[in-house]
Amino acid sequence: MTDGAGAFVISGPTAVGKGTVVTALKAKYPNIRVSVSVTTRPPRPGEVDGVHYWFVDDAEFDELIARDGLLEWATVHGTHRYGTPRRGVMDSLAAGHPTILEIDLQGARQVRRSLPEAYQIFLAPPSWDELVRRLRGRGTESEAQMNTRLRTAREELAAAAEFDIVVRNITVEQTISELVDLLGL
Ligand code: 5GP
């Protein structure tokens, strides 16, 4: 349990349901802010610039790194780069909003240095089989991309103990109620 106005890292393997849980939490608690990451990945159908991500090219991403504009960044699944804009997070915290960073394991590790006061939550799947089922069900990745993501997921699951707490995402409702407690909402 925290005082409710800090920074929270939510990490966990691909397709564990981070997006669903964070969207539901935000709908219920409009005071929450979710950091919008920058990425060099092209938008998926339906993704909106400035809402789901800030979509940038490699040169723009390089420039953000050069002027220390990112709290963390990483190459995820061996392909595209993703990063957390420093300014958005700092402004949100200064305005007193509980602020969520939904980022991968490499990013979470960097945030332990760049924003050590952030409370780090690891979202775990009910089981390995269920994670595979969810990833296949999403249907947005090719077979090769899926295998890369599953390999990364195995490594990420092995790092759960580095986090302040592990929340097992069995049902969205149960997970939300645990997060509400943890975030002190
Ligand atoms: P996707 O391409 O499916 O939207 O995201 C792929 C992965 O990138 C997810 O595991 C997500 O947590 C991670 N990710 C999204 N934004 C960031 C970020 O700003 N920094 C880091 N390190 N990872 C991110």
Image (cartoon, grey):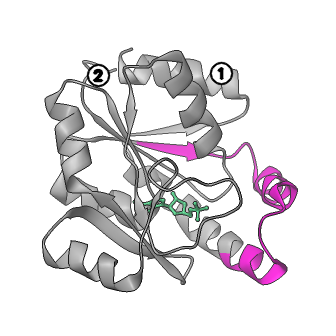
Q: Quadrant location of residue 63?
A: bottom left
Q: Are marks 1 and 2 in contact (CB under 8 Å)?
A: no
Q: Which residues are magenta?
A: 121-148
In the structure shown, which secondary structural element does the residue marked by tag 2 occupy?
Answer: loop
Q: Is residue 179 magenta?
A: no
Q: Amino acid at mark 1?
A: Gln
Position above or below: 59 against 61: below
Where residue 81 appears, as percent x and y from the top left, is: 43, 76
Q: Residue at x 24, y 30 (%)?
A: 6
Q: Amino acid at mark 2?
A: Thr
Image quadrant in which the N terminus is located:
top left
Q: Residue at x 47, y 56 (%)?
A: 53
Position above or below: 159 against 174: below
Is 95 or 103 nearer to us in this picture? 95
Q: Which mark is residue 2?
A: 2
Q: Quadrant location of residue 185?
A: top left
Is 130 or 43 nearer to us in this picture? 43
Is 155 or 92 nearer to us in this picture? 92
Relative side of 53 to 44, left or right:
left
Q: Which mark is residue 174?
A: 1
Position above or below: 45 against 182: below
The residue at label 2 has a CB less than 8 Å from ligand 1: no
Q: Is residue 130 magenta?
A: yes
